[in-house]
Image: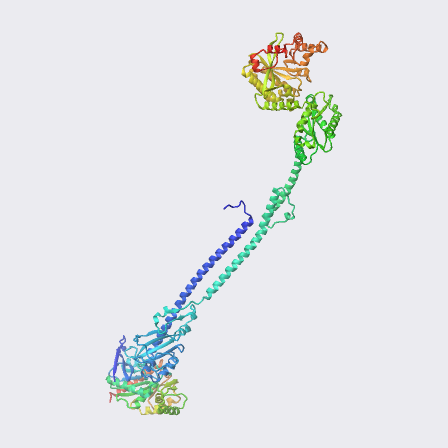
Amino acid sequence: MRAYLLCLLISVFPAAAHAVIAKQDMRPGIPAGAEYLIGERSKPAVLLLHGFLQTREFSTVATLARGLQDAGYTVLAPTLSLNIPNRERSLACEAVHHHSLEQDVDEIGRWVGWLKARGHPTIVLVGHSFGSMQLLAYLSRTPDAAVKGYIGASLIEAQIGMASRPALIAQLENRVLSKRRALVTHALSFCRKYTSTPEGLLSYVRWDEAHVLAALKRSPVEVKLIMGDADDHLGQGWLKALQHIQAPMVIVQGASHFVDGQHEFDLLEHTLDFLEHVRQQGPAR
Amino acid sequence: MKWPDSISIKHIALAFITGLLILVSVIGGFAAYQTRAVTRSLEQHNQNAALSELSAAVERLLSQTEDQAANLAQWDETRQQLVLPEYYTYWRDQRVYESGMLPPRFVRAALYDESGAMLAPSPAKISLPARLPARLPLYQSTSWLVDEGGHIALYHAFPVHNDERRQALLGYGLIRLDFMPALLHHEGLQFTDPASVHLTLKPGEVLAAPALLSRLQFSARPDPDQMRFQTILSRTLLALFVLLVATALLGFVAYNRLLVRPLRRLSQDIDAMQHGRFSTHPSRSQAMRISELENIRRSLYDYQLQLRELHGSLEHQNREFHSQARQDALTGCHNRRAYEEDWEAFRQELKTAPQGVAFLLFDCDRFKAINDTYGHAKGDRVLTIIADALVMALRANDRLYRLGGDEFATFLSRTTPAQAKQIAQRCQSLIDASAFTDLGISEPVGISIGIAFCAADQLEHIDDLPKQADIAMYTAKQPGRNRIALYGEDTERAAQALVASRETNALFQALSTPGMVEMHYQSIHGLPGRQVDYYEALARIRYNDDLIMPDAFLPVISNRRLETEFDLAVLHQVDADLSSGQLPTGIGVSINLSAQSISRPEIVSHLLELSRHNARHPLMLEITETSLITQMTEVRTYLELLRTVHYRIAMDDFGTGYSPLRYLVDLPVDVVKFDISLVNKLGQDNRAGQVVADFARMMSDAGYVLVAEGVESDTVLCKVESLGIAHVQGYLLSRPLPLAKLSANPAGLEAGASALA
């Protein structure tokens, strides 16, 4: 793995003085970047992941990153490549989605390793929305030991609209098995026409509510969910389901899916509480 | 070039209108020229605007293409295709358009790998190069144009890097535009005619984008506002011109009706008036529409009426004047002017209508004596009666002319000598029957008539008739005649008449030529010594070496009333003779003057001047007693004046006149010259001789100095001496001698005596 430290942006703000854009090739010809906000070494490093097709510049994520850095935490906010070299913008629903959840998880793993390589023994994964699900997918595999905690803000499953998920999965699996590489278009998350390779779409479609709840239950690290009770992106009963499995969860009253406005502070506060809790748990295993 | 003396007002109007139309045409032409210039300027402006617009459009298109290329180069999905080209065709045919990166029309895109090879072949209907041209500088964006089967394609190639820092080249992108549709479709060209935009490239030619504009052919779109402006302006100019032409025509018609025609009418009227033609045309009374012209017309009309009245009056007066000018005021018959006019007209008439013509000349016998005796008033009445009688005696169509004084004339047409004589006799009969006694004239008044006749075949002698009648008149007045004489028949002495005519000419020539009057001096002798006391100056006329005697020219003087002129000539000559010194000093000179001359101021003035000779030659004035002195008071005054300068006054021819005693009483007479007829009585031993002798003695006793003239015999001379008459004159003693001979023989007595002997 090659890592690049391409440039340092020095600004008048002290925090910005510790901001670095980190890049590394996720796959051949597919470099990806992440913003590395350097905090106190004594505090856990945070890997902050954006939502569906977004970038680290998404406001909820960017605001939270600045807040965490201000609180002295090192934050690494990557932008998933989605198989696009140096992707820097959110990807359109209709674009050729030539990526899969496995590749996303792989990139998360690479960034965890990048952090670890930078001497951060304690890493807390913080995700927003679909990113929370992708981080949960990473945790469901073989996470790095440095990962000590997980915060899922506005955690959501891979929604596919009104279609039958089993049928879709079966159709996609059929395509994959038959090696039919033609792009498929289907609703995914907030995209009504998500154009993707069959295997890529299939990788996401598998993560339904049950899959997510199971992953939560099997999380190897301490989990905390921060949800908004005004999140209209969530499916009916999702919060109850989360409560049903007794996942540690904070519901911010009045917060939407993007936990924006005044609820940004709630998000930051609850995140800092969890980070402080992790920090107090001690250094890495 | 010569300008006409005057120009018609119509021509002025035509010239004005023509000039106006020319001016309007010039202005219109200038406006059209200016419009054309403005139009060209606008066209040039449009052309420039079109060029600017097209340049901007091209720049926008190129810039837009560059922007699209830049967007494509920076687009994540572009980079994804260069890395993972599995779904490149989807991206190329659908995704780039659905994403809005490229417009769906006229534009196609393709991606090439780092070696310039196309990622995937393009569809058959889309012409895209399989490889990028090797010569292009592909490290940066490059545009070029080529002609592909009549369609101009704009290509824009651009590199695609893996990040914004362009550190790693992923491949290339190529955008192809259908240049013309892309240029013209999206651009709302306002100034450029889209159909005219054209780019011609040679086969295989590659045109770099920067050189595009210089190769682009186009034309400006006609500016609708400009076209509208031109149309409006052209219509306006045309309408203005038509309006002006119509106005000019109407103005000319109105001008013609309101000014030209009335002025022409007035001019014609004035011309007619100038030539004395007074039109009564009804249009004359028609009112004119122009008030000033109407005033002129009215004034002219009134003036014409007044002029017509004046003209009528003048014509009447002219007729009156003409009649009066041809009429003798005294007698009412025609005057000399009428005679001359009628005679000339008659002569002309004779040329076409030959006929026998008689010319009758009437002259009152002894009218001068009557006039002098009874006064002019009665003389005038005599003439009037004579004229009335003659008119009555003449034929109805014959005209009587008073030629002057007591001389009348008429000419008788279509007559014979006998008829003329008959008419003349009738004239005499009527005059003889006239009652002159009613005027207090007791003596008979008659007329002498001279007749000249010209036969129809001798009309070439018609001009001689007046002269012949005059000769006949002379004949008729001869004593013993019956007072009617026909020329040729009764004028035995025609030769004499011719002589008389010569003498008349001599007289008139003498009056106008100094020196022709020659004075002969006859001595007057004192008695009883018979010494020469003084000379009587007697006038002769020297004419062509002949000497014309007084009895030849005195009648002419009397008839022509030339007494004063002749006396002046005599005085001039006497003055010259006295001044010559040829007369012996102390010898006086007696000068004959007519009674009429004594009352003329110029005669008196000359006598006063002549009185300077009195010292050497005592001067005496002899007044003929036979002449009637009508202005006795004036004559007396002048004679007394002359006596103061030592003139002596003599009464000549005493005993033959009308009022001898009165003259002696009223006039300051010093000398009385007995007429020869009285002197001859002295030679007779009878009662008449005794009366004369007694009368002479009585006159001597009264203090008058007596002169007996015409003494031609010794008997008479002795008688004269016996009567105590102081002076004697006559051929017995001397004949009149010219001055030259008188100088040689001052006494003249011997000559006269010898002659008498």
Q: Position of residue B754 (x, y in %)?
A: 61, 10
Which one is in front, B225 or A255?
A: B225
Horizontal arrangement in the rendering, residue B300 relative to residue A216 (left or right) = right
Residue B564 makes an appearance in the image: yes
Residue at image coords 66%, 23%: B495
Q: Position of residue B38 (x, y in %)?
A: 44, 61
Seen from this angle, which residue lies furthest front? B457
Q: Quadrant of residue A2?
A: bottom left
Which one is in front, A252 or B695?
A: B695
Up-down relation of residue B303 to residue B195 (above or below): above
Seen from this angle, which residue lies furthest right? B433
Which one is in front, B194 or B485?
A: B485
Q: Position of residue B285 (x, y in %)?
A: 64, 47
Q: Position of residue B233 (x, y in %)?
A: 49, 61
Q: Quadrant of residue B150?
A: bottom left
Up-down relation of residue A176 to residue B383 (above or below): below
Residue B102 makes an appearance in the image: no
* Quadrant holding the C terminus of chain A: bottom left
Horizontal arrangement in the rendering, residue B598 relative to residue B62 (left or right) = right
Up-down relation of residue B745 to residue B435 (above or below): above
Up-down relation of residue B497 to residue A113 (above or below): above
Q: Quadrant of residue B194?
A: bottom left
* Quadrant holding the N terminus of chain A: bottom left
